[in-house]
Amino acid sequence: MRLSDFLREKIELILSQWDEFAGQLDAPGPLSAEVLRDHARGIVNAIANDLDSAQSELQQLVKSRGLAPPVAQATEAEMHGSSRFAEGYDVNQAMAEFRALRATVLRLFGENQQLAQADEITRFNEAIDQALAESLARFTALKNRQSRLFEVLLSNSPDLNYIVEPGGILIYANKSFAHVFGIRLVDLIGQNFFSLCMPFVADIDQRIRKVAASGKIHRDEMRVGTSRGEERTFEYLLVPVLDPKGRCEAVAGSARDITERKAAEEQVRHSANYDSLTDLANRGLFRERLQHELRHAARNGLRLSLLFIDLDHFKEINDQFGHGAGDQLLKEAAQRIKACVRDTDTVARLGGDEFTVILTDVTDAAHIDNIAAEINAELRRPFLLSEGAAAISASIGITVFPGDGGTADELVRNADEAMYAAKNGGRDQYRFFTPELRSLPG
């Protein structure tokens, strides 16, 4: 029986042993029997057809070296190389299948055909060599193309991309990484990654080793002083690179500059909590701060004072000089009030011409009088506006925790009533809350 006829007649037996061999491969993922058999069947049939064709000695020599002329359509061997590349096989795994095919056919043919023609065996080996070369060429071409594409992608990415051994040796870095650290790319490889990054992430060595040991991804942020003297914020990601046995052989990292995003987030947060005109705390942040300071005062047995400030004659200024001048006055009034208190105290604008002050950690009652009197004096001084000089004053209502009330709502209501008492009493003064104020007409 000719070898070509044997291949066609015994193809199911050959494929069954092919399946058995394929199941023993240390492959990255299982291939379906249909895929395995399609390529194997196609390769075996292609070899059988090749054995039936007439070939010169030169053609046989060329094929034995894997240098047969290319054909218009992809061969079965080339499709085999493409398939194994797509599935993540390495070269050894992909080529092992051809060695197994060669051994399987020769063994079975030897068992069934004692008087095999030597030239048939030679031509079979030549056909196998050619198929192997075609598969390897396609596999290698795809692998090289992938490497080039990924290198371009990683090297030119604005993100910092790098690969580091678990022990800290840098084995890959892209242009952005080199640019941020001010080190030539050629000089980076082999450097100690921990030494480079510890000024910005003190425990980076522990984080890398934890990723390597746990096999889990780690995400965090860091602030980096660049070679150009800028301080930037980066969000970084550490990903374990596992070998076929599941052991971590390296840690791949990327870091993205999020400085502008953080600034935008901070702007949104600031806008949500601060008055756009005066940059003082707004009503929402005032209530939050008051609740916080009340809890602090209650825990530590300290007094807290809340001042409500309403500008006298502000409407007249607005009517006389216009809203632009009114806004200018409000901004100047806010700065004068802030200058009268400590940094630990809170000054807020509730809206319009109403301001509040939270005085914390009050140990001396005279301190409250002094602050209120100073605010009255500061707001009494003329305001030099772009439209001309303006004079106002302020009516201030004062309440004290814990004597006047224990909740934020009580204190706000008390301070408001005391402020109206000051305004009704002639303005340009401050009044402390007393229970009797509740019986007075608003």
Image (tube, grey):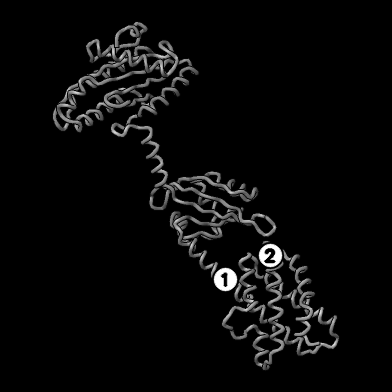
Which of the 4 image quadrants contains residue 59?
bottom right
Q: Residue furthest bottom?
A: 56
Kind of residue at disc 2 = Leu
Which of the 4 image quadrants contains residue 24?
bottom right
Kind of residue at disc 1 = Leu
Q: Nearer the viewer, residue 33 or 338?
A: 33
**Circle 1 residues within 10 Å: few <14, some 14–19, many ≥20:** some
- Residue 141 position (above or below residue 239): below
Residue under label 2:
31
Considering only order in the chain, which callout, 1 or 2, is on the residue closer to the N terminus? 2
Left or right, 12 with reference to 78:
right
**Quadrant containing the N terminus in the rendered view:** bottom right
Residue 208 in the image: x percent, y percent?
59, 49
Say if residue 322 shows up in the picture: yes
Left or right, 192 with reference to 81:
left
Residue 200 in the image: x percent, y percent?
49, 46
Q: Secondary structure at mark 2?
A: loop
Please give the name of the residue rendered at 47% of the width and 20% of the height, measured from the top-left corner: 295
Label 2 or label 1, whichever lies nearer to me, is 2
Which of the 4 image quadrants contains residue 106?
bottom right
Residue 311 in the image: x percent, y percent?
24, 21
The answer for how far apart the CA atoms under marks 2 and 1 are is 19 Å
**Circle 2 residues within 10 Å: few <14, some 14–19, many ≥20:** some
Residue 142 is labelled as: 1
